[in-house]
Amino acid sequence: MTNRAAAPKIPEDETGDPHIEIGGMRIDILEGAFSYYIRSLDAVVSRDLDRRMADLEVAKGKGKITTLFLVDDYPGVRPSQIADVLMRDRPATGRIIDRLVAAGDIRRETSTEDQRAQALYITDKGHALAEKVRGIIRAQEAEFFDFIAPEDRDQFMQMLKRVYLNMRAKWD
């Protein structure tokens, strides 16, 4: 195990399970609920990422960063494909796309394969933004999650990916 400076001592019960008490209060059944920790972690990680990207139009809200990356990585991607990745309905995805188009980060074109469909493309401004955001995310991963020992990161990431894929299967 790596020696970590400033790592807080986390109280544990007799089985070694972390003891959750906040401001002298227990959190009832939530102490054993995955959903509580997932929502709490999402809120904290999102706030930190928004702070790091405060001057960028993709800060705050959900889906803009993923959309930006998908359009950057897959020229001509359709909004319906993005909606599928985001697990959102088409109107919600359309609003995200509208914001990125209005900001000049992506552009819409009519698909060459289907005149009824839109194809999305990154702009030079959007590509530069995507590169900047990738750097911010790399820094956040290294700094914000520094308490996860390097030898535990791969295993934790594998577990998160399995959870994600299983939740997607339930969503579909």
Image: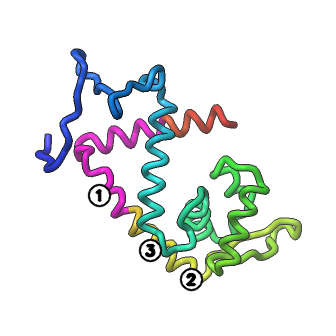
Disc 1: which residue: 143
Residue lying at the far right in this picture: please name it: 116
Q: Residue type at mark 3?
A: Lys
Q: CA distance from mark 3 to mark 2?
A: 11 Å
Q: Is label 1 in contact with label 3 (beta carbons under 8 Å)?
A: no
Of residue 51 and residue 90, the one placed in the foreground of this image is: 51
Disc 3: which residue: 132
Q: Nearer the viewer, mark 1 or mark 3?
A: 1
Q: Nearer the viewer, mark 2 or mark 1?
A: 1
Residue 145 x, y percent position in the rendering:
31, 50
Prevailing secondary structure class for the magenta stretch in the rendered image: helix
- SS type, badge 2: helix
Residue at 68 percent of width and 63 percent of height? 96
**Disc nearer the start of the sequence (1/3):** 3
Image vertical order of residue 126 relative to residue 60, above or below: below
Residue at 51 percent of width and 40 percent of height? 39
Disc 2: which residue: 125
Residue 151 x, y percent position in the rendering:
23, 42
**Magenta residues, as a range?**
138-162
Asked where in the image residue 83 lies, by quadrant, the reply is bottom right
Q: Residue type at mark 1?
A: Glu
Q: Is residue 155 magenta?
A: yes
Residue 24 x, y percent position in the rendering:
33, 29
Q: Dot 2 surroundings within 10 Å: few (below 14), some, or many (20 or more)?
A: few
Q: Is residue 32 magenta?
A: no
**Disc nearer the start of the sequence (3/2):** 2
Residue at 65 percent of width and 78 percent of height? 103
Q: Dot 1 surroundings within 10 Å: few (below 14), some, or many (20 or more)?
A: few
Residue lying at the far top in this picture: please name it: 14
